[in-house]
Structures are given as C-alpha cells and as structure tokens.
Amino acid sequence: MLSARDRRDRPPEEGVVAELQGFAVDKAFFTSHKGILLETELDFLRCVSAIIIFLVVSFAAVTSRDGAAIAAFVFGIILVSVFAYDALKIYRTEMAPGAIQGDQQ
C-alpha cells in the first residue's frame, strides 16, 4: 500500500489531470453571449447588494448620534448614490440596450 508521501512524489496520472481540467477557466465561455450576460448580471448584483449593505450600515451608524457616526452616514449615502449610478449605467448599456435604442429612433 502506498503512503501519502509516495503518492505526492509520483507524477500525476492521466485520470487525475483530466479531472482537474474541469476546474480550469473556460475563456471561450466568457467571450460568448452567455458569458458576457453572466458577467453583466454579476456586476449589477454587486451594485445592488452594495447599495443595500451601505444603506443598512449607514442607518445603523447614525442611530448613535456621534460626530463620527454622522460623517459615516453621509459617506455611506454618497457611496449609495455612486453605486446606484453605476447600477443604472450597467442596466442602460448592457442589460437593456434595445429599449434605449428604440426610444432614440
């Protein structure tokens, strides 16, 4: 029976290499239509989740009524507006480009 040290020193077998190739990044997928749409949806989801998190933290911070808490609230509201603008731009340019082009014609 082989110990863990013997298995570690041996070169990998073809079956193990073939199994690990399933975890490699498929660049063809990310350049396809589905991959681009997935990347856009994840970016939009990042913006929406950041908006929710910053709103909750900002309102929780302002309840203590300290000077630093009020500054954190203002900074959080500014960040919420930046992420909301980013989400709006992502939605307009990538998720619904047909609706904007139809309005301009």
Image (spheres, helix red, strand yellow):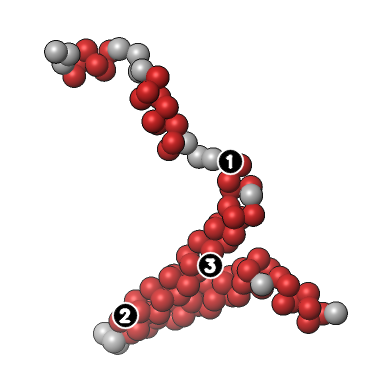
Residue drawn at 61 percent across, 42 percent down: 28
Among numbered discs 1 and 2, the one appearing first in the sequence: 1
The amino acid marked with disc number 2 is: Ala
The amino acid marked with disc number 1 is: Lys
Foreground mark, 3 or 1? 1
Q: Residues within 10 Å of mark 3 (few under 14, many from 20)?
A: many
- Label 3: which secondary element: helix
Question: Which image quadrant: the N terminus?
Answer: top left
Q: Provide the residue designation for mark 1.
A: 27
Q: Provide the residue designation for mark 3.
A: 44
The disc label shown at residue 61, or none: 2
Q: Where in the figure is residue 94, as x and y percent of width and height? A: 65, 66
Residue 104 visible (yes or no): yes
Q: Residue furthest front?
A: 15
Left or right: 103, with 28 as reference point? right
Among numbered discs 2 and 3, the one appearing first in the sequence: 3
